[in-house]
Image (cartoon, rainbow, N blue to C red):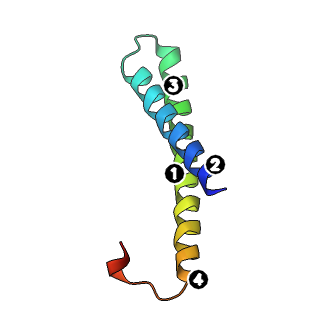
Amino acid sequence: MKAILLVVGLIGLAGGCWFTYQYMYTAVADAKRTDLVIGGVAFAIALICFAIFFFKKFREEGEQGDISITKF
């Protein structure tokens, strides 16, 4: 489950970067608005996936016992 969240988050991040790039360097006005919306949605999906991924990761580590700064 965590691996799927990480992969979906990375795909969303890549898609968000691509559509933001398209928004910045496209001359057609109608395409710009659509690219900006799609890029924003992709970034939001990536942010949500990464938040859930890190929440699950640190929750599992917290359940294992004492967490120390030196573990990193």
Indicate which disc residue 63 carries. 4
Mark 4 packing: few (<14 Cα in 10 Å), some, or many (20+)? few
State the separation of the CA atoms marked 1 and 4.
24 Å
Is 4 above or below relative to 63? above
Mark 2 packing: few (<14 Cα in 10 Å), some, or many (20+)? few
* Mark 4 or mark 3: whose residue is earlier in sequence: 3
- Which residue is drawn at the image coordinates 58% and 61% (left, top)? 52
Amino acid at dot 3: Asp
State the separation of the CA atoms marked 1 and 3.
18 Å
State the separation of the CA atoms marked 4 and 3.
42 Å
Considering every residue shown, the one lying at the far top of the view is: 28
Is 11 above or below relative to 44? above
Q: Nearer the viewer, mark 4 or mark 3?
A: 4
Amino acid at dot 4: Glu
Amino acid at dot 2: Ile
- Which residue is drawn at the image coordinates 40% and 11% (left, top)? 27
Quarter residue 18 falls in:
top left
Indicate which disc residue 35 carries. 3
| Element carrying mark 3 | helix
State the separation of the CA atoms marked 2 and 1.
14 Å
Residue highlighted by disc 2: 4
* Mark 4 or mark 2: whose residue is earlier in sequence: 2
Considering every residue shown, the one lying at the far right of the view is: 1
Q: Nearer the viewer, mark 2 or mark 3?
A: 2
Image quarter of the C terminus: bottom left
